[in-house]
Amino acid sequence: MKQVSILNNVIGPIMRGPSSSHTAGPWRIGRLAKDLLGSKPCKATFLMDPTSSLAICYHDQGSDLALVAGLLGKDLTDPDFFEVLDLAPKMGLSVSFKLEKFPEADHPNSLLVVLEAKDGSSVRLHAKSVGGGSIEITSVDGCPVLIKGDRHEILIEATPGTEEQIIQLLKQWTENIEKTTCDNKLTLHGSSPFEPSSDLIDILKKSQLAKKLKYARPVMFPLAGKELFRDLKHLLELANENDWSLGETALFYEHEILKLPIDFLNSEMEKRLHLMLDAVEEGLKNEKISMKLLRPTAKKIMEAEERGKVFLGGTHLKAAARAMAAMHVSSSGGVVCAAPTGGSAGLIPGVMATLIKDMGLSKTEAVRSLWAAGAIGLLLDQRSTFAAEVAGCQVEIGAAGAMAAAAIVEAAGGKASQACDAASILFQNVMGSVCDLIQGIVEIPCHTRNAALASQAFLCADLILGGYQNLVPLDETIDAVDSVGRMLPEELRCTSRGGIAVCPSALALPRLDLKN
């Protein structure tokens, strides 16, 4: 079972919209590729399988920008982000994107990256953006590896006869050393959550022991510890034994896996909360909103609710409108927090803003509620995926809805078991939800799904708090969601080749960003 951090993989990363798989993940791949090259790249070639989700979405969802920003050492939130394709040649980098089949392609977001430097060095790697901004590099220069960006990594092509000397040097830093032989080359791979000393790197570089050395730094918090729990049963046992809420249980999990102080972790989560609330406010102003298909409507809906111009209104509609507002920002390439993905980055902000503004939740309580939301996403990511390319919209916006339902139960003072049950019944209501984004753009139906499930999160929380008994627990529900999602045909998994994406009116929608 994979290791998951809530701040790395669930309530995060902090990113530019619109997509964590197609924006945040590629940025992380670019940063790691630059490190593995070991010098400034002068030429970059990116290959994508023509039938893949990435090939269809990479330009409209900013994968090209993110990859190049990573190579140039620019952050996702850098003001120059949208100019990086123009800046690259001026900074000595030639970039090309090609739609070609390649043998390693085994995922909808597979990418073959070939980098070259002026000094003649090069690197060729196969990488995958696997959902929610998580990534995997599975080969470097043809040799199998597994690099996820949450550890320090050293790759050494050993000079014949020097294997044991190199291993003894690496053991001063880590016991996690793997040997691989491919193409008659022996590669040693050392990995650790802790940074290697500069002395170790210098010795390895200057000695005759290594023909080649590649070093990559983590692009997220290193996983320095172990999981406090690995399944729902142990989570609930811990919560009951210690009289912890779901949010408290999640916080202590994160403390154990990252080995970072509790105060620091709460501060990091509060940063994400403020960023979420800022996205809601920005989306309601309409001032910086520039989408590709939709015109902003969140502000209009909120004003109609305030004037009593809607039929029902109230908390549910305000949460929905706020969720839509944050999605307006994400779709405009604004800075948001993936929760758990870019395509669902409006839902939890909409719910949290409503809990604070309309229900009087304090910032401290809101942070704890976000930890509770993180626990649900954690359980999903341990067992399944956040990638709609793999399992449909149910594991993106559906997951965010389930997470939000748990956050609401936490805010209401409910038990950890009740929060998990609220998440479970919401998942059960959206099971089988397809990803059929129109024209490959994260706007329709993503905005209304974020809005609708923000509202449904309150309903599911109230059903459980009111006494409904959920008889299919969250872990079994997640397994069912995963199974159903993988049964969906490729046309219904983020390829824009099915569902409403192929309706005549959808195909004919004019692009607002391409008008003269």
Image (cartoon, rainbow, N blue to C red):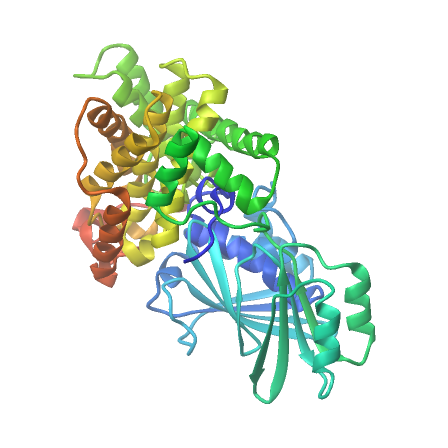
Q: In the picture shown, does residue 70 fall above or below 348?
A: below
- 460 or 260: nearer the eye? 260
- Kindly identify the residue that appears in the image at 48 percent across and 54 percent down: 25
Q: How many marks?
A: 0
In this picture, residue 157 sits left or right of residue 438: right
Residue 235, quarter of the rendered image? top left
Residue 498, quarter of the rendered image? bottom left
In this picture, residue 280 sits left or right of residue 311: right
x%, y% of residue 272?
51, 33
- Kindly identify the residue that appears in the image at 26 percent across and 22 percent down: 316
Q: Quadrant of the C terminus?
A: top left
x%, y% of residue 405?
30, 31
Q: In the picture shown, does residue 300 fall above or below 65?
A: above
x%, y% of residue 85?
57, 55
- 251 or 233: nearer the eye? 233
Residue 336 seen anywhere in this rendered image of the structure: yes
- Kindly identify the residue that appears in the image at 75 percent across and 70 percent down: 169
In this picture, residue 208 sits left or right of residue 139: right
Residue 67, quarter of the rendered image? bottom right
Residue 334 seen anywhere in this rendered image of the structure: no
